[in-house]
Image: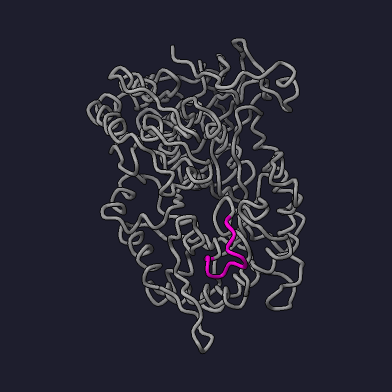
Amino acid sequence: MYKLKVAITLPLFLIAALSPSLAEDTIIREQNAVTVHTDEVVGKLYNLWDVRVINVPELWAEPGFAEMMAATSVYANNMVSVRILGGNHNNSCEWFKGVDENGKVIVDTEGFLDILRAQHRVGFNPWIILDNVPWAMSPNGERQFYGQCYPPKDMDVWFEYVRTLAQAMVDEFGMEEVKNWRFRVGTEPDSYPRHWTGTMEEYFKHYDYTVAALESVIENPRVGPGNILNPVTIQNAHKKKGRWGLKILEHCARGTNYYTGEVGTRIEFFSTSAYANTQKIFQFDEGMRLLRAEMDKYPELKDTTLEIHEFGEVRECLSKDDALSNTEFFVGLYAYSVDTAYKYNVRRIYNWDHHLGMVYTWYQTTPGLFQPWTKVMGCLEEMVDGERVKVERSSDKKVRHGAVSAWKDGKLHILAYSHHDDPNVEFENDIDLMIAGDRFNQHQNWTLEEKLLDKDNGVYIHQLYADIEAEGIMPGEISFPIQRNLERRYGKVRPMDKKAFSHGTKEGLPEGEANRKAASAVAKKNLEKYQQMGEMKVVRAGDVLALQDGKLNLNLNFKSSGIRFITLTPKGL
């Protein structure tokens, strides 16, 4: 049996100090109950996973990259480009070329549009993150963790820069299309100094000017502020400048607009980051509840949607162990998060592991080899636009559990999940699933289809690593270990600072080309085997079940984080 290892052994006193703590070391066995109330429709099962993010937008200029992205984005229709306005460590996307003698900004709109054209050509709606500020607008040229993170030295020049790019988009793609695209002003502005090396007031001004620049060209632009840090977690970035991200709501609702002088600023969506940390309980429900309560304080923002613009498992970035996003752990985490998102009417989740949905080596994708958590998306796709019904569950003990259920085309779909926040904890969870309601009781006999994904079914990565290492290709020692893909797990990396490596600068590119190619060759050679291993296990197919006392009871056994996808069809339909 494959087990994830703990990279760092913490002393007991430190483990005890973690709050909330995950110091589990025994097998947990639980019995829980989930009830699907088929008569109680709570809303439409809407799509919240149709977004893909890339923070290296210049890659769209490379031959074949657009086609590769289209082939590997089976559920994404919208492409979010981060740091597409310049201010990057590698000096890419520097469209701003200065100001002429008449005070007019000089902008390379063609270079900017080429990226959007490539995305649009292969079927994506380009969505724009309006950050960072270009280097030529920097007040001092100082580099921060994510590049040029200072406010522009001249806000009027920034206004004209954004306005010029907005006009170029409208001229190229038309108003009817561009007004439906999305624009976000920055990333984690309360993450001082990594994403925003300015004050809260300077960000408010920056936001107001940026929104005004868009409004000067685009009809009712769909724009919102940068995603704030998770307000219920302790992050070092809060310590120096305080937790002010939630104050953006008050400014947009009731503050004085720095550009117009009037009250309020346009805000179509409000977003946050939500990363799980496997050393602590993932306080996702608590975070969404807090955010929803804050937004509800402002009737002026009743049409503003709540969204997650960065989501994933962050602890893997700090460990030399296997990336959890490749395993069953992330399947359970994602299913739980989707269930919670529907609970609080979160409209979208930008999954930052989506660009890692395939095993690849240095932007060369192994076609058709998707990570396990994409199966959650596949199950949801079968339910999308259906009538979502109420699901009641027993209270969480140590193992998270629950289900998302919906009627669609006369069938009842149920996505049940089980998950533990600590990937090193072994557990078994028996769920008593009861399905009841007059609508369900209209048919006595139902045909059952059931699929399973857990540590032993639907996960190929453990076998892939074993096959690669059987060839004598061993994981390399790297200075900033992010082993989410073959290139970084098996390629050797020269010593460097973390900042350079994390942003893919020339100095930070991995060495060990032979190892990378050899690891990729193993994946391609055994592609069919891994594809088969990556499919969910069919537990039951075509079984006909009869209701007892107008109800149906199913026992679902989980031996790890994972999902079970059930489809019930009236016999004869």
Query: Which color scheme does this rendered protein use?
Result: one colour
Whole-percent x and y of residue 130?
A: 53, 63
Question: In this image, 526 relative to 17: left or right?
Answer: left
**Which residue occupies 49% across, 55% down?**
89
Q: Is residue 207 above or below residue 415?
A: below
Whole-percent x and y of residue 113?
A: 38, 68
Is residue 283 something one can see in this rendering? yes
**Which residue occupies 45% across, 34% down?**
376
Whole-percent x and y of residue 495?
A: 46, 36
Count up the numbered dots.
0
| Main secondary structure found in the magenta portion | loop
Q: Which residues are magenta?
A: 134-143
Nearer-the-camera pick, 432 or 38: 432
Whole-percent x and y of residue 375?
A: 41, 33
Nearer-the-camera pick, 484 or 299: 484
Residue sitting at the far bottom = 102
Quadrant of the rendering where the C terminus is positioned: top left
Is residue 438 something one can see in this rendering? no
Question: In this image, 514 relative to 229: left or right?
Answer: left
Residue 445 quadrant: top left
Question: In this image, 529 relative to 99: left or right?
Answer: left
Q: Is residue 433 above or below residue 343?
A: above
**Which residue occupies 42% across, 36% down?**
494
**Which residue occupies 49% across, 76% down?**
98
Nearer-the-camera pick, 425 or 405: 425
